Image (cartoon, grey):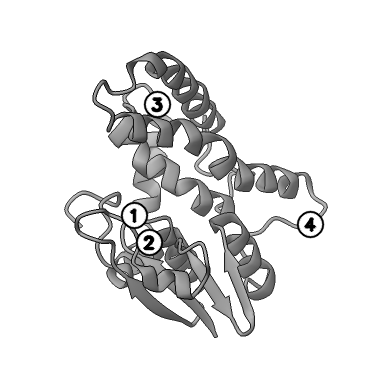
Amino acid sequence: MLTVHHLNNSRSQRILWLLEELELDYELKCYQRDADTNLAPPELAAVHSLGKSPIVTDGENTIIESGAIIDYILRKHGDGRLLPAQGSVEHEHYLQWLHYAEGSVMLPLMLRMYTGRLPDGGAALQPRIEDELNLHLGYMNNSLEGVDWFVGNRFSGADVQLSFAVEIAPLLHSLEQLPNLAAFRERIHARPAYQRALLKGGKYDFGPAGQ
């Protein structure tokens, strides 16, 4: 059986959501961030040496990295669901978005978060960070023009993978000029499987208001 090693307020929430969308059976092992440092507890390092979440175990397989986990779950357990047909144009687009989520858009978001903790707010870097945020969030917003989902206007694992960036973006950059991203955020939060995942995953500050 799949086991999800889940850290509160983390990227692993989207893995729970994916499993709920697929209505798969899984075991959930929850870990809590340190109240002072906000870091993951050392127990996670006993599962994988990096000590980061999400981690999924499936028999003898231990998988890290959200994109790899989503890919693994859909290939091994998805029965063709939420995954465009291999060899199709949509599948190539799906792979691009799956890697784009952590490979491109998360970098300026994380830089904005970390520099914000510096005494001067990382003032020298802020113009470049702002340019990158406008570039990447604008690209995502434009990609949703006239459609609900990122790949062929059909809900897929790519939407699950991209969700975390869209959820934390309002904390770091206004979505006022990005209406398609704001609407995407509302759509994913309204999905019944997303709501079920929230109930199982515990505290998650980036979900719907008033959860």
Near-viewer residue (94 or 145): 94
| Circle nearer the N terminus (2, 4) | 4
C-alpha distance separating marks 4 and 1? 29 Å
C-alpha distance separating marks 3 and 2? 22 Å
| For residue 139, side relative to residue 7 (left or right) | right
| For residue 90, side relative to residue 208 (left or right) | right
Q: Are marks 1 and 2 in contact (CB under 8 Å)?
A: yes
Discs 1/2, front: 2
- Bin the neighbour count of mark 2 within 10 Å (Cα to Cα): few under 14, some 14-19, many 20 and up: many
Determine which residue is flagged by label 4.
Answer: 86
Quadrant assignment, res 14: bottom left
- Residue at 64% x, 83% y is 60
Residue type marked 2: Tyr
C-alpha distance separating marks 2 and 4? 26 Å
Residue type marked 4: Gln
Quarter of the image with the C terminus is: bottom left
| Circle nearer the N terminus (3, 1) | 3
| Circle nearer the N terminus (3, 2) | 3
Q: Are marks 2 and 4 in contact (CB under 8 Å)?
A: no
Quadrant assignment, res 182: top left
Pinpoint residue 37: horizontal percent, then vertical percent.
Answer: 25, 53
- Bin the neighbour count of mark 1 within 10 Å (Cα to Cα): few under 14, some 14-19, many 20 and up: few
C-alpha distance separating marks 1 and 2? 7 Å
Residue type marked 3: Leu
Determine which residue is flagged by label 1.
Answer: 190
Quadrant assignment, res 183: top left
Determine which residue is flagged by label 3.
Answer: 178
Residue type marked 1: Ala
Determine which residue is flagged by label 2.
Answer: 194
